[in-house]
Amino acid sequence: MLHAIPWAEIALLVHVVVVAILLIRVLYHQHDTGVAMAWIVLLFTVPLVGALGYLLIGEPRLGTARLRRQKELVAFYQNFSQLYLHNINRHVCYGLNERYHGISLIAADKTGFEATEGNQLQLLDTDADIIKSIRRDIQNAKSSCLLAFYIIDAQGSIEDLLHDLLAAAQRGVVTSILADSVGSAHFLRGKWPQKLRSAGVTVTEALPVGLWRTLFVRADLRNHRKIVVIDQKIGYTGSFNLVDPRFFKQNAGVGEWVDVMMRCEGSLVQALAAIFAADLGVENDQNLLMVQQWLFKYGQEALADNLNTANRTNNDGGAVVQVIPSAPEQGSPVIYDTIVNAIHAATRRILITTPYFVPDDALLLALTTAAERGVDVTLIVPKAVDSLLVRYASRAYYPALLRAGVKIALFEGGLLHAKTLTIDHEYTLFGTVNMDMRSFYLNMEISLAIYDRDRTEKIVALQNRYLQNCVYVELKRWQQRSKWWTLIENTVRLFGPLL
């Protein structure tokens, strides 16, 4: 007599085996305790979703071809820094304030980019000024226009900027755009890429996604950098995506995005150009060859000219600045380590602006102990954000911060998208990095460490202007809310490391 196949028992056995294997992988591959615990909770509470999620996005798979190109470009990073930056900025970090000397070495050791001197910085704190300044520099470009953005949205004044790029390419300027596949999906599927390519502009999709590709390459690793380099003499970076806030996400219910950008001249621009070139070259073999040829053809003459310019600027009161690129393939969270160490170095005041705040235990401890030892710590976040999960996860940390004496200011003038951290009015971290684990561990990001009191004072003044449009969270009133909110927020907090 034939017995029925016990499909239910087989399915249960397969399920147990899969979860057990993935649990071992989590414990082996996830070095951050918070991330590991979040995946374990997910695997045991919703096993099917947890298993599928971990297989798709649990580990930072970049693909063998990309890793091969990455190895070639890592050598380029190091050679570039040694050849073009090290000699004229030899041991600049040793002249820094003792508190920041060690912090600068952390980034230099992990990225190859040392602190450089003689840099001129212009803080642009309105979208109109940012767009106007970038357009003016594109219109005056003589040799190259390089742009990398997470989001490009071809509406309003951004269409005018794209027309400037068309004109630049048509007059012989080497023009290249790198747009993230997810952030710029609408742009990449629209009319503009073909229009730009027809004029000679190189348009590259960064970290392309697709159903088949997802099986081999993790789909949520994103290029979140914002970089503009003009003629290898002028550079921009900051929180600003290539969007016109009058049109962008108007139905999100968070108001217009509020951004900042830094216009730079001096030797740090060469680091921005190197990072752009590496990001472009790593995407495909054709780009890698193009970048190598481009560097050979344009690199030495242009860089030599710029280094002479940088030497001349050193006597003009330029700032000491360090470019810090961070990416999952580096194998070490360089910007996270920099932020935590900078917070521990503070003695008087810490001011932070970030749209998304989901810390881990170490970062939370750094902030709370800073406040408890008498440092004036203020966290400025938007009152409304465009991610419901991040909103709830962030709020779960408020009680611990408030009890320690950290001030939490909710910005009411739109979605404050600026990412700034100032320490004691003399040190700044400025760039694209949010205060969350995704930015620290998964995204490709870029930051400027500014070792300069005058420039930091300008950023502090901007942070103080943001505070004028804020309401503060009060601990007693926060604790009087319904207990259901605390339950919801603490539940979402469990998955904070994955947000």
Image: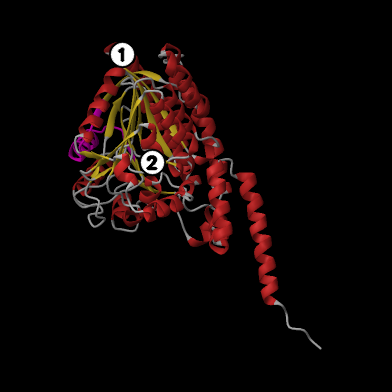
Q: Which residue carries the number 1 mark?
A: 312
Q: In this view, does 199 lie to the left or right of 110?
A: left
Asked if residue 302 can be seen in this view, the reply is no
Residue that appears at 48% across and 26% down: 107
Report how many numbered discs are placed on residues in the image.
2
Mark in the foreground, 1 or 2: 2
Q: What is the distance, in whole Å, between disc 1 and disc 2 at their CAs?
A: 51 Å
Crowding at label 2, few (<14), some or many (≥20) Cα neighbours within 10 Å?
some
Residue 166, compared with residue 274, is above or below; it is below
Q: Is mark 1 on a helix, strand or loop?
A: helix
Say what amino acid the circle numbered 1 marks.
Arg
The spot of residue 471 in percent (x, y) is 23, 40
Q: In this view, does 298 lie to the left or right of 242?
A: right
Residue 271: name its quadrant: top left
Q: Is mark 2 on a helix, strand or loop?
A: helix
Residue 340: name its quadrant: top left
Residue that appears at 44% across and 52% down: 492
Residue that appears at 22% across and 35% down: 466
Magenta part of the chain: 122-147
Q: Which mark is residue 399?
A: 2
